[in-house]
Image: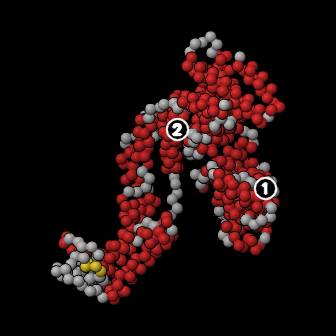
Amino acid sequence: MVTKTEETELNQFEIQVENGGGGAWEYLCLVRKLKLRRSEKVLKHGSSILNDPRKRSALGPDEWTLNEQVAIAAMDCQCLDVAQKCIKVLQKKFPGSKRVGRLEALLLEAKGLWGEAEEAYSSLLEDNPLDQAIHKRRVAISKALGKPSIAIELLNKYLQLFMADHDAWKELAELYLSLQMYKQAAFCYEELILSQPIVPLYHLAYADVLYTIGGIENLISARKYYAATIDLTGGKNTRALLGICLCASAIAQLSKGRNKEDKDATAALELHSLAAAAVEKEYKQKVPAKLQLVSSVLRSLKI
Amino acid sequence: MAEDLVLDTAIRDWVLIPLSVVMVLIGILRYFVSKLMRSSPTPDAKMVKEGQVVIRARNLKVGANFIPPRSFRTRRFYFTNEENGLLHVPKGEAPTNPQAAMFSDPNMAMDMMKKNLSMIIPQTLTFAWVNFFFSGFVAAKIPFPLTQRFRSMLQNGIDLSTVDVSYVSSRSWYFLNLFGLRGLFSLILGDENAIDDTQRMMQMGGFGFDASKSLGAEKDGLDIIQHEWALPRFEQRAESVLRKLVK
């Protein structure tokens, strides 16, 4: 995760570089270290460094890393000729290298030649069966081809080996959600909560999935996780607040005539009204035009 | 008996300083040679998977109270169950693992030998050199008094039994350098590479990532946990947060 100081530093650099000040190289290094996706800026400033022979020789051995970074950024911006040029330079310098092979396969992907890209990745995998990035690219290919079920299969196999990779779990959760396999998505979100219990996003997503699956137990759990999100964000997350109101009304509907969960129901009542009040307050502050709408919706939920 | 011997300054110039300089140089040389000779460890799939399993099991232990009880129980079962749980090491495999791994895996055996050799040979050579050239005279005086027991250790080149034990031979200077140059190496080679001989000797004893033990330890850790779902508490906390917000 990016820390606050790094974020401010990055923004400063961005502004400085955009307005023509120096520091392009430091900016690029920071982007590379933090693994951010600022492809346009990287492409612009990176190419300006590479095309200027004086600046290029000043880089020394870092020139090749810069080539790689600019190649990837160019592919992201669909400037395939720039990418091709950078990759050719790298190929001349490092023939037969695994990293350059990966870039070439990435270029095939960017051109839309999925079959050749898949072949290239498979041959690279034979030499290095434990390369995480190549596995993930194959999943990306299946996803781009619109075959989420194959992507899920590949990702599951990957996770059997590398089960501590929480980005992969995030991706798998999204894939399951796109296929509406909610129970499996809930499992993935549980994994994410386990690895990083303080991040409120995962609690929120988990609560959403539980609410969608439905059923009174899940609704009660969902309410608890929305409450956790509120606690972790200090009450600022509107989605969690609305989630609580919706849960409360759904629970009230489902448990009509049933007497169990009495304890939970009374807790919910306070939480529900508090959440509704918080939502109204926020709308009053930020979007007063829609306050009427929100109030009427909340009132209808209370029934 | 405690007369003060005056030691020639030539001893300092020609014994103590050259010995230290030589040991520092040998340490640096050893560092570079080990960097050259280091074969990049090709991680095999099993070890990678075990490493990741351990990380995931540890996450489960840490975050256990954040997920609903049923999910926790399912996961715990997945990890620790007797037949095909990930952390369960069948009894037969466990004790033979380290030895068998060492002898059957030629790569690891080569690695071990290389590490040991790169440490033993310079030590032996330097020690022999010190003994040959720098023995038979008093080299230095230790600033604090010692008991007679240290005489055999510190004074073995000196054949006089009446000399104060504080006067030591160059062999002890060699040992002092052996154990003490770590600080200097951390300055010269950068903080991470300052493994000097003491640590290497410790490394010689244990070796490698003993997977079966760590798996067993994680399994025990998981078995012990009592799951206490923390989420209900969150509801009350959320209430208080919101109350404060709405006021």
Give above or below for A194 relative to A264: below
Q: Position of residue A252 (x, y in %)?
A: 65, 17
Residue B131 in view: no
Q: Which residue is mark 1?
A: A40
Query: Which amino acid does the dot numbered 2 rest on?
Result: Gly
Q: Nearer the viewer, residue A104 or A284?
A: A284
Give above or below for A145 relative to B44: above
Here the colouring is secondary structure
Placement of the N terminus of chain B among the 4 image quadrants: bottom left
Q: Using residue B77 as the reference point, say whether residue A10 is left or right of it.
A: right
Query: Which amino acid does the dot numbered 1 rest on?
Result: Glu
Q: Chain of mark 2?
A: B
Q: Nearer the viewer, residue B98 or A260?
A: A260
Write the residue at 45% across / 40% down: B87
Q: Which residue is mark 2?
A: B63
Location of residue A178 (image quadrant): top right
Write the residue at 79% across / 29% down: A291
Q: How dense is the environment of label 1, judged by Cα within 10 Å: few (below 14), some, or many (20 and up)? A: some
Q: Nearer the viewer, residue A269 or A101?
A: A269
Location of residue A187 (image quadrant): top right
Residues at circles 2 and 1 in contact by the CB criterion of under 8 Å: no
Q: Using residue B11 as the reference point, say whether residue A269 is left or right of it.
A: right
Q: Nearer the viewer, residue A230 or A197?
A: A230
Q: Position of residue B232 (x, y in %)?
A: 55, 28
* Camera-side mark, 2 or 1: 2
Write the residue at 33% across / 88% down: B9
The secondary structure type at the circle numbered 2 is helix
In the orientation shown, which residue stands out farthest toward the front? B247
Q: How dense is the environment of label 2, judged by Cα within 10 Å: few (below 14), some, or many (20 and up)? A: many
